[in-house]
Image: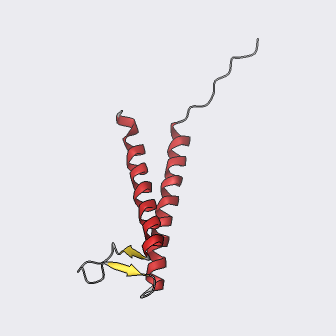
Amino acid sequence: MKKYWIWFILLGIIIFDIYHIYFGFESGSITNFFDENGVNEKFKVDESPLMYWLSMGFHMTGIFVVIYISIICLKKNSTPATSKPKP
């Protein structure tokens, strides 16, 4: 079970990003994770379309990065097929 913890973390990141993208499209606003002082907690597509789409792109990039990391880990952990030597 120890070696599969990374897959649970990566799956959690994908679910987190898909959740924010879906509800970002539905509601027209997305959470601002980079705001330190709490003034601008959400970006709305009507008020600041550039920052809204940059935040959506950030979440999409997160999904692609996780898929890329997963492919690299799968290639690294897979063992080549062994064949029997010919007589």
Residue beneath the point at 34% across and 78% down: 42
Residue 50 position within the rendered picture, expressed as x and y whole percent measured from the top left: 48, 84
Residue 81 position within the rendered picture, expressed as x and y whole percent measured from the top left: 63, 27
Residue 38 position within the rendered picture, expressed as x and y whole percent measured from the top left: 24, 79
In the depicted structure, whether residue 78 falls above or below residue 13: above
Residue beneath the point at 46% across and 60% down: 18
In this view, the residue in front, 81 or 6, is: 6
Q: How many marks?
A: 0
In this view, the residue in front, 41 or 34, is: 41
In the depicted structure, whether residue 76 falls above or below residue 81: below
Q: Residue furthest front?
A: 26
Q: Residue furthest right?
A: 87
Q: For residue 37, what is the image quadrant?
A: bottom left
Quarter of the image for the N terminus: give it: top left
In this view, the residue in front, 25 or 33, is: 25
In the depicted structure, whether residue 48 falls above or below residue 15: below
Q: Is residue 6 left or right of residue 75?
A: left
Q: Is residue 71 left or right of residue 55?
A: right
Q: For residue 24, what is the image quadrant?
A: bottom left
Residue beneath the point at 49% across and 78% down: 53
Residue 61 position within the rendered picture, expressed as x and y whole percent measured from the top left: 50, 65
Q: Residue furthest top?
A: 87
Question: Tell me, what colour scheme is on the image?
Answer: secondary structure
Q: Residue furthest left?
A: 37
Quarter of the image for the C terminus: give it: top right
Residue beneath the point at 49% across and 52% down: 69
